[in-house]
Image (tube, rainbow, N blue to C red):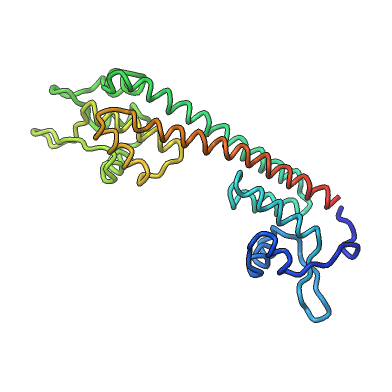
Amino acid sequence: MQRNPQMRERLRPVDLAREHGLSTQAVRNYEEAGILPAAGRTAHGYRTYTSLHAGALRAFLALVPGHGHRTATSIMRAVNEDAVDEAFRIIDESHAQLLDDRRTLRAVETALRDLAPAAAPGHGAEAGAVAASGTEWGGTFIGPLARGLGVRPATLRKWERAGLVRPRRDPVTGYRVYDAADVRDARLAHQLRRGGYLLEQIAPLIEQVRAAGGLEPLQATLRDWHDRLSARGRAMLTGAAALDAYLSERA
C-alpha cells in the first residue's frame, strides 16, 4: 500500500533525470515501460514526480548491472503492480542463473585441466566418446564428435564456418575428419558457448590457442569470466538494497 502521494514533495522530470545523468525523455520512457509508477499531472498536463518515483528510478538503475535491463524491468513492473511475490520469483530465477553460470565456469576450468596433458581424443569423457569411431589415419567424423559433445552436426558445421574448427576432408569419401587439435578446439568452443560467449568472441581465443600451441591464453579469459561473475553477484547485493529501500517507501 503506497503512502498518499500528496504528502510528498513534487519533482519535475528534469529533477529525476539530472540525478542520474539521464534525459527527461528517458525518464518518461521508464514511466511508460512501467519501471516507474504513473506520474501525477498538473492542471496544465505536465508530469510531476515524487520521492517515490525517485526511489523507483534508483532501484531500477541499481538492479540493471546485476540482473540486466530486461530482468530489472520485469522486477520493477511487478513491484509497481503490487505483485511483489512475482518480483521475488524473478529475482530468484536471476540468482539461479548466476549460480548456473558459476557451475559452467567450473566445468570449463575442469575441461581445460582435462585437455592440458594431451588435448587428444581419448582424454576425458567427451573425448572418449568421439574416439570410438576414428578413421584409419587418426581422426574422427562429424557424427561421433557431435554425439560426444552433445550437439548437432549442424552446430559443428556452423562452428567450422565461424573458424572455430578446421577439419580436413577424407581423400576417399570427402567426409570431414577431425584430428586431435580439432577435437580440442571443438570441446573448448562447446564449453565457452555454455559460458555465454559468442562465436565471434570464441574464434580469436581458439586462434590464440592454435598460435601458442597450448591452452595458456585461455587463462586470462577465465580470470575475466570469474571477475565478471563476481561483479554480477556484488551488483545484485547493491540492487537488492536499493529495491528494499523502494519497497519500504511504498509501504
Is 43 placed left or right of 226 in the picture? right
Q: Nearer the viewer, residue 186 or 19?
A: 19
Please give the name of the residue rendered at 33% of the width and 22% of the height, measured from the top-left corner. 115
x, y percentage for residue 123? 31, 18
Furthest residue in direction left, as rendered? 172
Is 18 placed left or right of 7 in the picture? left
x, y percentage for residue 194? 44, 36
Please give the name of the residue rendered at 86% of the width and 50% of the height, measured from the top-left corner. 251
Task: Indicate the quadrant where residue 205 lies.
Answer: top left
Q: Nearer the viewer, residue 186 or 142?
A: 186
Is 30 placed left or right of 171 in the picture? right
Q: How many marks?
A: 0
233 relative to 132, above or below:
below
Q: Nearer the viewer, residue 9 or 93?
A: 9
x, y percentage for residue 65? 60, 47
107 relative to 165, above or below:
above
Task: Indicate the quadrant where residue 143 lies.
Answer: top left
109 relative to 35, above or below:
above
Q: Nearer the viewer, residue 5 or 33?
A: 5
x, y percentage for residue 154? 31, 41
50 relative to 198, above or below:
below
Furthest residue in direction bottom, as rendered? 44
Please give the name of the residue rendered at 76% of the width and 46% of the height, measured from the top-left corner. 84
